[in-house]
Each structure stands twice: as C-alpha cells, then as structure tokens.
Image: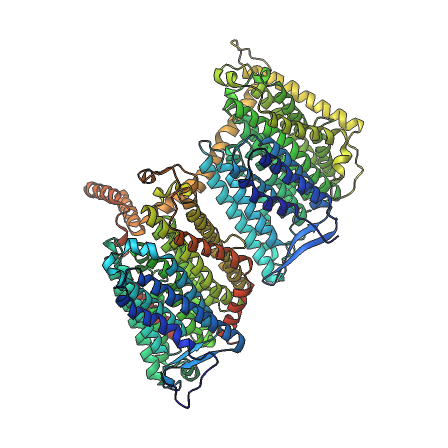
Amino acid sequence: MSFGPTTFISAAGSTPVLVIVIPLLAAMLAPIVSRIHRSVGWYLATTATFIAFLLSLSLLYTVIDGGTVSYRMGSWAPPMGIEYVVSYFNGFVLAVIAFISFIITLYGKKSVEQEIPEQKIPFFYSAYLLFIAGIMGIVITGDIFNLYVFVEITALSGYALIAMGKDRKALMASYNYLILGTIGATFLVLGIGYLYIATGTLNMNDLMQRLPEIYDSTTVITAFAFIMVGLCLKLALFPLHIWLPNVYTYSPSIVSALMAATSTKVMAFVLLRIMFTVFTPEFVLEVVPVTKILIVMSCVAIIMGSLIALGQTNIKRMLAYSSIGQIGYITLGAAIATETAMTGSLIHILNHALMKGMLFMVVGAVVYKTGIVNIKDMEGLGKRMPWTMAAFTIGAMSMIGFPFTVGFISKWYLATGAIGAGMWYLVPVLLVSSIMTAFYFWRVVESVYFKGRSARIDTLKSPHHSDEAPFGMVVTTLFLAGLCIYFGLWASGPVEVAKNAAAFLLGS
Amino acid sequence: MTEWAHPGVIMLVGTILIPFLKGGVKKSYMLLIPLVALAATYYSTPGTTVWVYDYMGLKLVFGRIDALSIGFSYAFCIMTFIGGVYSLHLDDDRQHIAGLLYAGSSLGAVFAGDLLTLFLFWEIMAFSSAYLIFAGKFKNSTKAGTRYLLVHIAGGLFLLAGILMYYAESHSLAFNGFTPDGPGGATAFYLILIGFLLNAAVPPLSAWLSDAYPEGSITGSVFLATFTTKTAIYVLIRGFSGAEILIVLGIIMTLYGILYTIIENDCRRLLSYHIISQVGYMVAAVGIGTEFAINGSAAHAFTNIFFKGLLFMGAGAVIYVTGTRKLTELGGIYKKMPKTVVLFMVGAFAISGFPLFSGFVSKAMIIGAAHYEHMAWTTMLLSLTAVGTFLSVGLKLAYHLFFRPNEHNELAMHKAKEPPTNMLVAMAMAAVICILFGVYPKALFSMLPFPTDYNPYTMDHVTASLLMLGFTALAFYIVLGKLNPHKTLSIDTDWFYRKTGGMFIYFINSPLLKIGDLIAGVVFTAVPNGLIYFMRNPLGAFKIGADTFSLAISGSDRRVKLRSRIKREKAIYPGDNIKHWPIGSTVVWVAVFLLACLLIYFV
C-alpha cells in the first residue's frame, strides 16, 4: 500500500487497517496452510485474532490519549475515499470484539476437531476468520456502503459456519437465516441508496453534516425507516428474532459462542452508530419518534425473550432466547438516549458479550464431553464437570444481576438512566425480567447441583467420577468467568470508557 | 482507632480455608472464626465510620459502627459459635461454608452504612441460606429451597427498585431513616419497606419461612432461625423506626403465627410459625419507635436469637436421633433423652416469658413500651399472644415431643437416645445465655442501642406473668382431656369450649390453610408451570386454547372432530422447534414494521 505525498499519516499509522487485513489475510491462508497439518488452521486463527486484539487495544489507548484516529484507504481523501475511523465509541466495541474472538478461538481447538469433519476444518477456519474480519470491519469503517459490504461478508461467512453444524437441522437454520438475513441486508442497502441519492455522499461524517438540512425530506425518512427495520431484523429484535434461536441451537458450539458474543452486539452497535452519528440525536429524538417506538419494542423484547426462555428444554435454545431479551437491554438504553442510560447500553455490549460468550462456551464444553443439550439430562453434571459448572453458575449469577457482577453494572446504569430520564416505569420491566432470568437460570443450576444423576450421565463412561473438559476449554471459560466478576468489582475502567463513548454519541 | 477488622468479612474470608483442612484442625478452625469475629466486634469503636470505598463514584460504607450494629454483631457472632458447635459432628464442608457465609453476610448487612453494600450482603444471605435448605435432603427440600430462593430474589429486587428510585433522586446511597416524602417519594419508601418486610416474614409475605425452614438441614435451620429475620429487624430499626404501619403489621404477625402453631404437626414448622409470631413483637416495637421500644425490639431480637436457636437445636436433636419430625409420631421419649428435654424446656420457658428467663425481660420491655405510649389494644393483643406462645411451645410442643405416651411409632421410641455431645454442649451454651439474660438483665441491656435502667422484676409484673402462665397451663390440662377422648360423652358446660374450640380449629384448618395453600399453589406452581407450558410453543398452545374454546361453544356435530383435533395437537405438543415460527410470518412482520415505521414517521 503506497502513501501519496498528501496522505495524512495519523499517530497510529496503519493500525486501523491492519486490524481488518490480518484476519482477512489469515482467512485466505487458512485453507492452504491447513494442508500441512489439520491443527495449523487453529494456530493461524489464534495468532491472527491475538494480533488483532493487540492492535485494537493499542488503538483504544491511542484514542483515549489523543482522540479520534482516522485512516484513509488507498490514501483517498474522505468524502471520496473510504475512511476508517476509530473514536472512543467504536474503539471500545472493537477491543471487546477482538478480545472475545481471541478467547473463543483459543477455547475452540478441541471442540472444532470434534464437531467439524476433518476435511472441512480448513474451510471452517477460513470462514471463521472471514466472519471476524467482517464484524471488525463493521465496527471500524467510517463509510456507510463499506459498512454494508462488511455486513454481507459477516452474514455470508456466517451462513457457511452455521451450516457446518452436526445436526441436519443446521442446514434448515442456516437457510432461514440466509433468507431473513438477506432481507435485512437488502433493506439496509436500500436505505443507504436513498441516503446516497439524497446527499451524494457515503461517508458517515459527511452524511452527518449534510443530512440536517433535509431532515424533513421523504427520501431521508424512508431511508431511515428501511435502515431501522433492516437492522432490527439483523439484531433479532423481537418479533423479528425468528432466525436466531435455531442458529444458536444448531450451529457448532464455537460458532454459537462467537455469534452470541459478537454478531448481534455488533448489529446493535451499528444501530447506535447510524442513529447517533449518521443521523443526529435531534433527528431520532425530535424529527421522527423513533426512540419512543424503540423503547416499546425493547421492553417487549426484554419481557418476551425472558418469557420464552422459561419454556425451553434445550439449553442452547434457552440461552438464545435469553440473548433476545438481553439485546432489548442494549436497544433500550440507546432509546432512552440519556448519558447514563447510554452508558448502560454500551457497557452491556461488553458485559453481555462476556457473559453470553462464556455461557455458550460452557455449553460447548458440556457438549464436547457428554453431548448433552437437554436441561433435564444435565442433572448431576455439577459433580462430573465441577469447574465448568462453577463457571456456569457465575455466568448465571451475573445474568440475574447479582451485585458486583457485570450484569449488575449494566442494570444499575440502565435503571438509574431510566429513572433519571423520568421513565421510572421502565424499572419494573428490568426487574420482572430479572426475576424471570433468575427463574430459568436457577432451573439449570438446580438440576446441575441438587438433583440426582440423570440416566444420560449414567450411560457415560465411569459416571461416578468427575470428568472435566480439556484444559484449554476450562481455563478460557474460567478466565471469562473471572472477568465477569473482575469487571463487576473494578468497573470504573470500562464504565469510564463507556461514559465517554456515550457522551460522544450524544454529541455533548 | 482507624484500623478495624470487619467481623462479617472475617467470616466470609475465613471460609476459604475450610476445604483444605482436615480432622481436628478443621473443627477448631471453624470454631475459631466466630471467636475472631467476636474479638473484632469487641475491639470496634462505636461511633466511627470505616472501610469506606469508592465504587464507580458511589460511596460504599462497609463499617458503620455504633451501639446498634455492635449489639447485633455480638449476638450474631455468639450464635454462629453456638451453631458451629452444634454442627461440629457434621462432615459436610459445603454446609459449613454456607453457614459461615450466611452468618458473615448477615454481619455485613448489619455493618453496612449504605444501601448498595446492604443489597450486596442481602443477596449473599439469600443464596447461602438457600443452600442450607437444599442441604436438608428431605423429600421437599429442593423444591422448598427453590421457592425460597426465588422469593428472596424477588424481594431483593423490590429492595433494589427502591434503592434505585432513592438514588436517582438524591444521588446518595445513605442508609438512614426513610420517610414517604424523602428522596424517591412514597414509591421508594414502600419498595424498600416491602423488601425488608419480606425478610422479616410479615404476612402475607411470610409464606416462604414456614415453607422452607422446616425443610432445611438440621444444623442449617439453627442458622436460618437466627439470621434472616433478625437482620430484617435490624434494617427496619435503621430505616423505619416509628413507621406506624409496622405496629399493625407486627400485631397481625404475632396473632397469625400463633394461630398456625396451634394446629401444626411438624415440630420445626411449628417453631417456624413461632419465629413469625416473635418477630411480630419486634416489628411492632419498631413501629412504636420510642427509644424504649427500639431497645425492646433489639432486646427481643437478641433473646430470641438464643431461645429460638435453642428450640430449633432441641427439635433438630430429636429429628436427628428419631428420624421423624411429625408430632403424632413422637412422644414419650423424655426418659431416653432427659438432658435434651431439660435444655429444650429452658428454651420453652424463655420463649413463654417465665420470670428468670430471657424472654420475660425482653417481652416485658416491648409490652411496656406499648403501655407507656397508651396503646391499649396493642398492649392487650401482645399480652394475649404471650399466652398463646406458652400454650403452644411450653405446653403443647413439649408435651407431644417428649411426654405424651407414644402409641404410634415404636421405632422412633426405640431409636431415641441422647444426641452427640457437641449438640448438647451447644444447647447448654444457649440455655445458659437464656438464663443469664433472665437473671442478670444488665448483660442484655449492655448490648442495646440506648442506655436503660429498666427493671422488669417489679412485683405486679412478676405476679401478673405467673398468673397468666398458670392459667394457661390449667387450660391446657383441661383441653388435654379432649385430646385423649373419653368413651363416655357428657354434655356439660364443656360443650362451649368443645364446640367453640372445634369451630376455631376448623376455621384455621379449613378456610385459612386452604386459602394459603391455594395462593402458594397458584403463585409457585400454576402460573410458572402454565407459562412454561405455553412458552414451549406459543403458537401451538394458542391453537389448543382456541380449539378448546370453540369446543365449548360449538354444537354437537363439530364436537367429535374438535375433540380428536385437540387430542392430536396435545399429543404432538410442543413439536419440532424449528417449525414454530416459520419464515413467512417474519417476513410479514418485517413488512408490518416497515409500514408502521413509515406511517408513524410521516404522520
């Protein structure tokens, strides 16, 4: 890549683009180098995600020290060329995503070897890295069409990843997602097209400056409606969530974990990004009543997600519906649109990624060792896999919102934000969902620890002894569990970043 | 002195080592922890605020040390020690750890100077105490434990909601007296109050207690009887002293608890109802709110900790050796476990308020406080409950547990013997304290928040108590005849007490208990189970519901068809998950959404 004489080289150099290029390159290399040995793919993926994580961390620190970093792709100046922008807001999300992807990759070696047929492993890692490159691209890009491209990269690699699930129903799940995901993406690109027609630019900063003059134009409002609906479908906001439970249930364990931790969160991020940095807070608050609609939708999502999770017998499904409820938290904070609530929303992106990623990793470990996905069959697992189940318990406590876990921090900010904005009636929604969360998670904890041994475990080899998942899986899971507590106790760091990001989004 | 060791944290941290120790070392270590905590309490300076931390800009106070918190800390530490001795024979690390976590978090709540710290320890209490119920391993322990935990999580959320409202308006977490017109308004006031009252087991929020405590493990229920309700009294004193609604609630509690004890058959369940009734005294005293009443409330909490602990230990010992908890299957074992009987009777006399026992002093203070404030009804009703207490614990329970000729269960009789020495020692310690507080009330008064020179041993008070107790005993003796029926039936004036007594018992037995069971059934079973069933496949469930409805309204020609359809639908329910929510419906939803958005935006 050559830099012309006019190129502005920021302090961070080319770090912003390297974050994307490294996983992208690794994705291309994966099918080739995996011919050498089947485990090379894993080493490649781990290295690539680790480097991406380090880079994203250095970017975040650069942003904290010196403000927004911008990178011009191919040294074309922004309104024409594609710009990568890292601010407080997306630097934070980028670091979270890179970190979670790294941990999940580290975790997944054995699980992938067991669940994916050997000849497909090279392609698996290729799609896997492509997926990660895609979500990181979504976060980092400053160009709205480029964003669409990355959304499609993520989605297409996602379809392939899901379809590699062992169960034949994975194909059905992938197909459903393909159809609905495509509809979502189409809406998104339609909206972007309308915006382009109206303003003649695709750069987000540029759009933000040009749009206010024409806020009352039909084209812009229609564009906004298309984008909103498309994104709500992509982030599985109830009742547009139908693709999600099947995807999380039938895809390979590591893919469930990765998607649960990153993909919907990134879509929520995009929603925030477009609402507040392409359009402005005035637009979403005053010109169109979108925040009011979103508050109602989020409450419905929170309650319904938790309610449906109550009825699930399959643990992956239960976690999936729980995710649908939790996404409601993120959109709720965004829709209240005060600094405190927005902080809660952003911190919940981190917190939920930690919790849900970890919970799916636990399920992955259980599936790896025993093949159990039914909650009833999990009876007695507490003795058999004590460490894994300890991690699950911590995750469950955190989801319930036990004080000084990460789940509590999110709820605290969301609730105080809601009350501060005069919407005290949202507090019962949060609390009722907490009770339901307690109910469905406790059912699992109860059967894991306080019931006898299920017939299913009796059929396994030496049912009386403990039989833990491989070391790598247990350690990574416990590490995330530890973080669930660590970031609950020493929350100031992430909260500070999230607060700044919230202030940035609200333009204050 | 700025250096301070938090007694609660000593217990919480102390648990870490338990799994790694063995044998005698472990036992002495477990007894050492509460003693160290006791020493830490002794060396705390009243009137200081220590262990203040900053958490995301919130001020957390772990150590608010004053006379009130120190008094509760003494009582809790001593009772933890006694409970530790009582469970010494037990080889179950998890129970020991849960017990200490429970005690430690209660102490944490006692020393908490702000609402968030309080909430933290509040939740740890709920989870650790739930484990003690799970560890009961009785038939219903797991279910009761789950219900207990969920109720407490729900109560905790009420508290949290109140805290949030309070914080959002005042930006302070200070835990001082609440008023309906303080920050957060009446909403915050009542939400926090509900959270506290749930833990204090005020009816109708009390069902969890009598439901769960009898299912707890034998050693665990000694802890359970001590901490949750007394911590609730502590926070009520802190936050709501003088709130008049508490007087009414307290009186209702005392009477409610007593009514249920009269018919109860499970000995620990009976004692659980007594907790409710005794805590009622304390709640009422908090409501009266004068310094003397607060003293009475705290004093009754302290005496109650020991005599209720003693009674639970005695009942636990009987269950431990005989393996049964039903009163109808017990009795006649006094010959085989005389020491237990003597110690149990000390507790029974203390709870009944015999002169020279601890209950006499503390009950006198509360009734006296009501009397000084000229609350005639309160005074009278509280005195009435004292009679009921003596009747049901001192007489009924003791009689059925130990003295009644045993005709039903030879096995229990055969198995009965003295419990392990450590149990007896623990009971003896509690008994000594019960008598000490009664004989030398100054020991009790030194633990109270306000200085007092009250003298319960006035001539008229002692005489009145003795008369009341004497007549109660006499009445019991008469009713006893009814319990062991004679073959002849003579119609005499006894008809009145027979019939009215019978009607009274019918009233409690039938409508009251049934309604209670109905509510519990609906809240804990029907609603959640119905929801769970429905949510397996909402569409399918809805279809079944619709078909059932049309079955009800349609003519006979369609009925056969409908019946077979419902049958088929039920047979395949919930069916294949992947087909529940077809893509088509989502696409329709998307279209509806888009339309709705556009319509709303443009209009």
Quadrant into which the N terminus of chain A falls? bottom left
- Judged from this view, the residue extending furthest toward the bottom is A5
> Looking at the image, which is closer to me, B464 or B119?
B119
Q: Give how far across and how far down residue B245 sits, in percent.
A: 63, 45
Q: Is residue A253 visible?
A: no
Compared to residue B378, the image places residue B116 above or below, namely: below
Drawn side of residue B461 relative to residue B481, left or right: right
* Camera-side residue of A364 and B378: A364
**For residue A63, above or below residue B140:** below
Q: How is the image coloured?
A: rainbow
Residue A85: image x %, image y %? 43, 78
- The picture quadrant where one finds residue B348 is top right
| Residue B28 as seen in the image, left or right of residue B368 | left
Looking at the image, residue A182 lies above or below residue B449: below
Residue B159 visible from this viewpoint: yes
Quadrant in the rendering for residue A31: bottom left
- Image location of residue A240, percent across then percent down: 33, 62
**What residue is shown at x 28% (from left), y 54% (from top)?**
A115
List the single residue furthest toward the top: B488
Considering every residue shown, the one lying at the far front of the view is A36
Q: Position of residue B172 (x, y in %)?
A: 63, 60
Q: Is residue B571 above or below residue A271?
A: above
